[in-house]
Every structure is written in C-alpha cells, then in structure tokens.
Image (cartoon, rainbow, N blue to C red):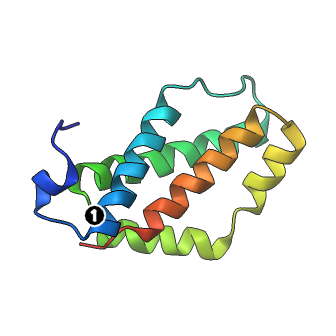
Amino acid sequence: MSSRGPRESRGPLKSGAAERVLRLRRLWEEHVHRPFPGTGNDPRLQEVALYSSWLGSIVEVALGQGVLDPNHAEMLKTRRAEGNQVLFRAGGELGEPVRSYVARLITIEDLLAQLPIR
C-alpha cells in the first residue's frame, strides 16, 4: 500500500470525497488490525469471513486509487441490493464480538458506496 494519500495518488478529490477516503482508510486500518472474532466450522462465521475477504479486496483497490473502480461499484451495488440479512443474523445469533465486527464491515461498505467512481 502506498504511503501517499488519495489526493497525491490520483489528483485532487472534492473535499467530501477526500474526507470519505480518509475515514475509510482509518476504519479499514482499525479493522485489519483486530483479530477475526471466532474460530471453528460454524457456517455463520464462515459467511462473515467470506464477506470480510470480499469487501477487503474492494477496499484495498479503492484506497490505492482514491476512488471506486466501476466494476467494483457494480458488484457493490448488486450486493447491497441483495441485502445483508445473513450477516445481520450471524451477528445477532453469535453475539459479541461478531456483532461489532459485522457492524464495522457494514460501515465500511457504506463508506465504499459513497466514494466517487472512476
């Protein structure tokens, strides 16, 4: 990951977009430095882990570019249309710390959806 900020890497961003990228970067850094909240073969945990991995691949590209790739934007749009009921259910049924982990992932998803599309 580059140490340059989004403004330096891809030209100037509008103030609101730059703030969202910075907020996303801070939240993502916090997220990746926390351990996954469970172990074992529980399918609910596996669903959360799969979603985290999928979302992370999009976040890493968006942070590197300072914008959301059009293909990723379409995938995110589709995912958001499908809803997050499985994740909400997993968080609710498994309790803390999974609930907080899922809430952070949903917040990250919301921030991604607000980024400008390249």
Residue at 46%, 68% (x, y): give it: 113
Q: Quadrant of the C terminus?
A: bottom left
Image position of 57 (left or right of 100): left
Residue at 66%, 39% (x, y): give it: 101
Residue at 40%, 71% (x, y): give it: 73
Image position of 39 (left or right of 116): right
Give the vertical position of 63 relative to 2 (above or below). Answer: below
- Res. 68 visible in picture: no
Give the vertical position of 49 relative to 67 (above or below). Answer: above
Front one among 109 and 39:
109
Residue 61 percent across, percent down from the top left? 29, 51
Q: What amino acid does circle 1 point to?
A: Val
The residue wearing badge 1 is 67
Give the vertical position of 72 relative to 95 (above or below). Answer: below
Image position of 71 (left or right of 24): left
Give the quadrant of residue 84.
bottom right
Mark 1 burial class by Cα count in 10 Å: few <14, some 14-19, many 20+: many
Front one among 6 and 52:
6
Residue 40 percent across, percent down from the top left? 75, 23
Image position of 45 (left or right of 112): right
Residue 25 percent across, percent down from the top left? 38, 45
Residue 14 percent across, percent down from the top left? 24, 71
